[in-house]
Amino acid sequence: MLRKIISGGQTGIDKAGLEIARSLGYETGGTAPKGYIAGDRKADVKPDMSLKDVYNLVELTDEQQRKFERITGHDHDLWSARTFYNARNSDGTVYFASDTESPGLKSTRRFCRMNRKPFLLNPTAEEMATFIKDKKIEVLNIAGNRRSKMPTLEYEDFLNTMREALESVNK
């Protein structure tokens, strides 16, 4: 039975997933980048303490960052390590994207494969609910493009899909 939704807390799909989950009574959490940074564009990146105070995310530690770099051979950046830990610490990931060639999507897919976790891209509400049930997901990682990468109507469709699936999954 689904009990918790996690994400990295980025603006857009990540944070919307947490908001929807919280509104439906699910536990929330996840791993956020050091400093709880989030932003829609590089120039807008700043700490978002609601990730800690409202959504219960934990800040990536220096030790986790070093371990991530050893495991993956990946250089330090603001986002990749948190993506790795959210994929690893969940039972599966659902990803919503307009930009299906984004580095974030490619990293998330790779980290799900590395951690042997199921991954689903741009599902319908029925597909998402079936994925959660069939894979026996208790902790779901919701990830996706930043808000600035999505047209408004598509973003709203993704949010409606998430809400509908999360409302139906534990019935």
Image (spheres, rainbow, N blue to C red):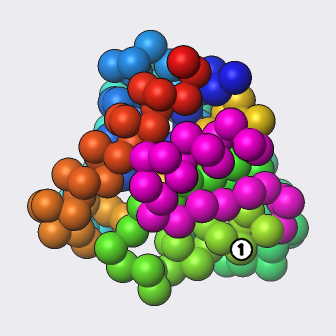
Q: Spot the residue most to the top.
A: 25
| Figure quadrant of residue 5 | top right
Whether 119 is among the magenta residues is yes
- In the rendered image, which residue does mark 1 sit on? 110
Whole-percent x, y for residue 171 in the image = 54, 18
From which residue to which does the magenta span run? 114-135
> Who's the residue at 39% across and 18% down the image?
24
> Who's the residue at 68% across and 37% down the image?
133
| Figure quadrant of residue 84 | bottom right
Q: Is residue 128 above or below residue 111?
A: above
Whole-percent x, y for residue 87 in the image = 69, 53
Q: Is residue 71 visible?
A: yes
Whole-percent x, y for residue 45 in the image = 29, 58
> Who's the residue at 34% across and 30% down the image?
19
Whether 63 is among the magenta residues is no
Q: Spot the residue most to the left.
A: 152
Q: Is residue 142 above or below residue 3?
A: below
Q: Nearer the viewer, residue 110 or 41?
A: 110
151 sits left or right of 142 in the view: left
150 sits left or right of 152 in the view: right
Query: Which type of secondary structure does the marked residue at label 1 adopt?
Result: helix
Q: Nearer the viewer, residue 169 or 119?
A: 169
Whole-percent x, y for residue 86 in the image = 65, 48
* Amino acid at dot 1: Arg
